[in-house]
Image (cartoon, rainbow, N blue to C red):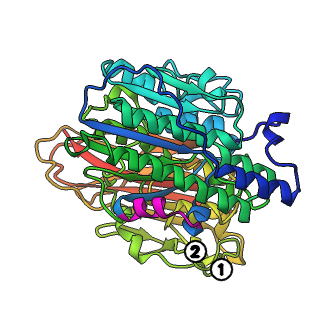
Amino acid sequence: MTHPTPSRRSVLAAGAATAAAAAVTNLAAAPAAQAAPALPGGISKDKVLIIGMDGLRADRLEAADAPNLKSMMAKGTYAKSLLYTAPMAGTLSGPGWSTISTGVWPDKHGVTDNSFTGSRFDAYPGLLARLAQEKPGLSTYAAVDWVPLDTSGVITSGADAKLVLPQHDVPNDAKIAAEAEAIIRSRNPDVLFVYFGNVDQIGHTIGTGPEYMEAITQLDTHVGTLRTAIQGRPAYASERWTVIVVTDHGHADAGGHGGSSWEERQTFILAEGPGIEAGLRPIDTRLVDVVPTVFKQLGLPVDSAWNLDGKPLQERSGDPFDSLQKKLEPRVDETGIPAGVLGYTHTAPRGWSVINSAMGTGGVTEWRGWTFTTNEFWSRSQRDQWRELNVRARGVFAVADSDEWSDKTFSGRFESTLVSPTYGSLSGRSEITITFMTHYRQADQQTAKVLVSFNAGPPQEIKSYASDVIAQQQSIQVPVPDGATSAHVRFQYTGDNDFYWVVDGFQLHAS
């Protein structure tokens, strides 16, 4: 997180390697176990431990000496997710932990920076507050050492007992681990949210080099301590424990975050527990999935009226575009995307097609007509043009990007049409509902139209876009004409060196 206060910088003297080494050495010296606070007895055999690791960059985790976390990856599911950037929110801890704890993106929960100004926790409460509303008998505990996570209410609100330490310092991770261990061993909690902040502190002070990697290793020992405490509970054999590890943002190589680089946008969810597949690396997981995952593991329903953006980690999106994952290719003309990143294809999924008969020639190969791609590949093609705000797309999605296509010599205009499969069984139905997620940025000389064709007849326009629509779900109702038995949908886009249109999660239902 970014806290430009003297206490944030007190752990390590800036640029002093000896101080950094001393800090990492001190990190290993855990204090004696803390006396566990009063906590009501739990009521559930389904239990969840959430371990929040501030500022832990996913690629650094994967390279670290972290046997406990690597064991969790082997025994559970590990999924990476990229953050938004401004103007939705900065890659900061305030919006990051708010997204994790509420299960919605910043355009709903309202937190855009570390002030928490504009928060809407009344409409979108944090996880423990939500659990207190829905299942008040659960025994819940929270431990943090970044005070705003307490004062804002985003993490500790609703907890039956909590530990709140001053601005995080090297020994705090060990203190938090010791108290959480004592609670797990000697009390009967149902849900714990345990936060560790020192990796982020070291990232801020000296970057993501060797000291940062060593801090990850030390953090891994705390994870091991808590997992061992769970397994040592007398009632462990009859309990069903889920452990979730999650981070709020990444770090630039030199340290710091809040910007739009890929390094700062890295987050992940790692989970091990009943019903969570071992060794799975899903591409359709996002940071908002923690809350519904916790509810599923506790056997509690998620009310659609909550308007959450997440889904349980173990549930796949079912989107047809995601079936293209194994067909994704490396870059051809793009230069800002690393050569090893597989992220685009022009091959449509089964039943879908792309019409490029009026498409101009030349241009950037990757974006010639509607393309199927991923958030990492697409957003790294060009920063700071709101591609990073495409937060509600999951896995593979379809994009028509005339702006990127025009970055290489071309002639003609960008004109391409994405065509859905034909849906039959409309006899006797009065209406179809077409739903999809769209992320659209408007510019001059650009058109975006949704058209429907019944019984293979002439396409009829049912919606068009003439202004920005940022990562929003769309629902369009269309009457079924008399005698119609089938329908298909078209997404027709034209552009001229301007912006883009994303479509994902398409569904058609008849009623």
* Picture quarter with the N terminus: top right
SS at badge 1? loop
Could you classify mark 1 by the number of other residues whose Cα lies within 10 Å: few (under 14), some (14-19), or many (20 or more)? some
Residue 190 belongs to magenta span:
no
x, y percentage for residue 25? 71, 55
Q: Give whichever of 394, 400 is nearer the camera.
A: 394
* Picture quarter with the C terminus: top left
Q: Which residue is mark 1?
A: 333
Q: Looking at the picture, does residue 173 appear above or below residue 70?
A: above
The stretch in magenta equals 64-74
Residue visible at 45% across and 41% down in the picture? 50
x, y percentage for residue 257? 73, 49
Q: Give whichever of 341, 466 is nearer the camera.
A: 341
User: Is any part of residue 397 visible from this angle?
Assistant: no
Q: Quadrant of residue 115?
A: top right
Residue visible at 36% across and 66% down in the picture? 279
Q: Which residue is mark 2?
A: 366
Q: Give whichever of 20, 137 is nearer the camera.
A: 20
